[in-house]
Structure formats: structure tokens, C-alpha cells
Image (spheres, helix red, strand yellow):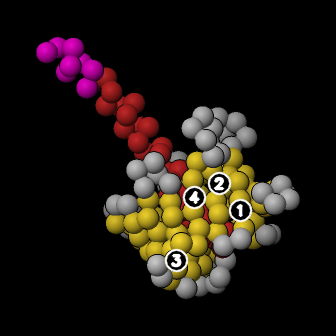
Amino acid sequence: MKLTWKKNIASDYSIFNDAQKIGSLRKEDLFTDKIIGKIDTEEFLFYKKSIFDSSVSFKNTEDSSQIGNINFNIWNNKANIEFGGKRYTWRYNNFLNNKWIIESTTGNKAEYTSRFSNGEINIKEDDQLMILLGLYVKKYYQRNTFIIFFVLFLPIILRSILNN
């Protein structure tokens, strides 16, 4: 199955099958790290248990049952995903970090590509949650990269402004 996605200025994602919108991934509100993922008729909530936790849990919003976890390895841009009694690995597939995959021990489950604010998803099975997981992990790493650059370059920018 081949899908497309688009990201808006607020970093919310919309997912399309042909030209029809079938899903989204958006921040619940401005002051939390909770993300709502919707695809077809299913809705999922991604949330951290604490601000310093490097893992995220996700649950079905219909019955509030926890479905699985994502454990992030920030130093090598990988994530281990567990749900449905299975383990998957999310990882970048090239140097530019514009291609990434979710794979299991049996092979690739989904492949993603990015062109700045849009891209494609090629998924082998009709698994709604897998579609959202790939975009959620990408969103997580992009946000962390922005924060790291901001923290590293803010002193340099402030110094140059104050010296002028």
C-alpha cells in the first residue's frame, strides 16, 4: 500500500491515500507532549510518563488500553517499538535522514521517505498503527534535533547580538 503525508507549519501530519485524507498526527494541546494519532476510524494517544523519560507509551483512545511502548536511543537515532507481542526497530535508512524504515526480524514492514514537508509511506500490510508509528518517531527525532541546535547555537547568536 502506498500512501502520502504532508506536514504543516505546526508540525502536524496529514496522511492521504490518493487524494483522500485518511489520518493525522497532531499535538493534543500546546502545553503537553501528548500526540493524537488518527487513521481511518482508529485513534491513538502517544504520551511520555515523565518529561525526562526516553520512552513513550501509546494507547487506544476508545478503551484507554495501553497497546505498546517506543524506547528511543537518542545517540544513534534508533527506536525499539513493542506492541502486539512483537518487537520492531525504527531506523534511518540513509545518511541524509530522509528515508527511514520500520522492520522486524522477518523483514521490512514499512518504508518512509521525506521531502522537507511531505513524503511517502510504503507499507506491506494494512496496519494503521504502523503508519502512525513511523511518522511519530520521525517527529520525535526532528523535535529533539531542533532543541539541541537551539541550545547549542543560542549562546553564539546572543553573543553576536550583544557585541554589536
Residue 152 position by quadrant: top left
Separation of residues labelled 1 and 2 (CA atoms): 7 Å
Judge depth for marks 1 and 3 and give the one in front: 3
Residue furthest to the top:
163
Which residue is pictured at 79% across the width and 70% down the height?
A: 84
Separation of residues labelled 1 and 4 (CA atoms): 10 Å
User: What span is colored magenta in the figure?
Assistant: 157-164
Q: Is residue 56 magenta?
A: no
Left or right of 164: which side holds 154? Answer: right
Residue 162 position by quadrant: top left
Mark 1 and mark 2 lie on one chain; the one further toward the N terminus is 2
- Disc 2 crowd rating (10 Å Cα; few below 14, some 14-19, many 20+) is many
Q: Pointer 2: what residue?
A: 36
Q: Amino acid at mark 4?
A: Leu
Judge depth for marks 4 and 3 and give the one in front: 3
Q: Is residue 160 magenta?
A: yes
Horizontal and vertical percent position of residue 156: 26, 25
Whether pointer 1 and pointer 3 mark residues with C-beta atoms closer than 8 Å, the reply is: no
Instruction: Out of 92 and 25, give the one closest to the viewer.
Output: 25
Point out which mark residue 20 bears: 3
Mark 2 and mark 3 lie on one chain; the one further toward the N terminus is 3
Q: Pointer 1: what residue?
A: 43
Point out which mark residue 25 bears: 4
Which residue is pictured at 57% across the width and 53% down the height?
A: 26
Whether pointer 1 and pointer 4 mark residues with C-beta atoms closer than 8 Å, the reply is: no
Q: Amino acid at mark 1?
A: Glu
